[in-house]
Amino acid sequence: MNRSSVMKQIKAHVFMGALFFGAALSVSAQTAVKPAAPESKAAVAEAPKAGALGVQSANIFSIAPDANTDPKYADQNNGERDKVQPGNNAPMWRQVGAGVNGYTSLPAAVAPEAGNLIQPFVQYPGSKLTTAGEAWRQVRNNWIIPYGGSLLLIVGVAIALFYYGKGTMKLHGAETGRKIERFTPLERAAHWTNAIAFVLLAVSGVVIAFGKYFILPIIGTTLFGYFTYFLKNVHNFAGPLFAVSLIIVFVTFLKDNWPSKEDFTWLLKGGGMFSGHEVPSHRFNAGEKVVFWFGVLGLGVIVVASGLVLDMLIPGLIYERSTMQIANMIHGVATVLMMAMFMGHIYMGTIGMQGAFSAMREGYVDETWAKEHHELWYNDIKAGKIPAQRSPEAASHGAAASTSASA
């Protein structure tokens, strides 16, 4: 045999030997390992996956699939439920939803509701019977925001249409050049302080409440966030200034705002705004008195009181969520009504009536203006019942002018 034939036979024998060795090893492995007995489904569910890392969660329905057949299943507390279905915290969350207070180490004086996650069910005016937080959201989003915004728009459009149709109320007669002091420096300072604070509060409040509808789409979320945060601080600082100045305004102008019998005639005739004929009135007409009593005093007290609650500045008051929710709703309704009323007042005091703005800016009106718009007040001045110059500075100026004229 040659060398080539010998090599072929060796290779054939090696291949056959390896084949038989592999077959024998496979048979021995199968006979050595016995098949395990079949396990129950519960055991399979409980067994962790091979090679898995970390804490293994359990399938509560596989652990105790028939636990809910217990007649007392719905009455179980969280500890009892954990024995049959570990990880099923339904009893705890059911208590949370019902408004049950949990344990907290915080003092009640600092955090009276720290242990309560969800408020109990209530029904605010305009809301459904639901949790207090959701009820507040329904009132704010479904009533205050849409209807309050609509009221402000309606008043603004009505003023614009009235101005377009009537224009500025002009004087019918020529000015005489003789001036009557309508507002003293103290009265003007109180009014302007209150007016500036009101404008700051109104602008910031409108942006905070309605800005996401007409400003946010234009400037974006980031800039709008910084803008509203700035206005929120302006609102909080202007609020106390408005409250103090409101008290001063009320005390300062109270004397001339008491109702009189002539006010009923003024109201019945609408002040003569549509007829073109002025209705005689005293220093303040019935419309101004309505603004004073209903706007400055009535709504003013409500707005200031609810604002102080929202700023948590009233000592001794327990600031629970329900307290803040109610204060927020009252504040929203009162401020919208106040803004709507003062929009008309601002219109008449600026472009709506000739000479009205200069009267508050400088303090004086012409005799013609006084006679046409407040005839009864003008007649009292002419009769000597009311001095034409009421402040010391104006009185000295008027005396000097009289001496100059007589010389």
Image (tube, rainbow, N blue to C red):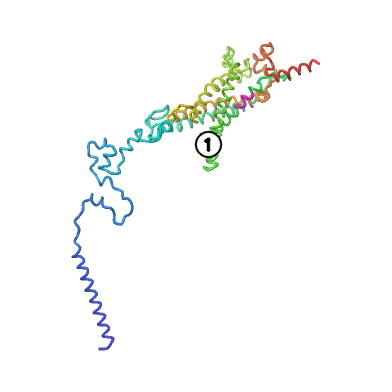
Magenta stretch, overall SS:
helix
SS type, badge 1: helix
State the residue at coordinates (27%, 42%): 82
Q: Quadrant of the N terminus?
A: bottom left
Say which of 44 and 248 sits in front.
248
Q: Quadrant of residue 198?
A: top right
For this view, does 292 lie left or right of residue 325? right
Image spot of residue 400 (x, y percent): 76, 18
Above or below, 252 against 25 in this view is above
Above or below, 179 against 57 in this view is above
Magenta span: 188-193
Image spot of residue 101 (x, y percent): 35, 33
Check disc 1 and report the residue beneath it.
211
State the residue at coordinates (69%, 12%): 382
Say which of 186 and 37 sits in front.
186
Q: Residue furthest right?
A: 407
Image spot of residue 133 (x, y percent): 41, 33
Q: Residue furthest bottom?
A: 1
For this view, does 104 lie left or right of residue 276? left
Image spot of residue 332 (x, y percent): 49, 29
Residue 222 forms part of the magenta stretch: no
Q: What type is the residue that disc 1 sits on?
A: Gly
Q: Quadrant of residue 139?
A: top left
Q: Quadrant of residue 367?
A: top right
Crowding at mark 1 (Cα within 10 Å: few <14, some 14-19, many 20+) = some
Query: Quick check: can you spot residue 134?
Result: no
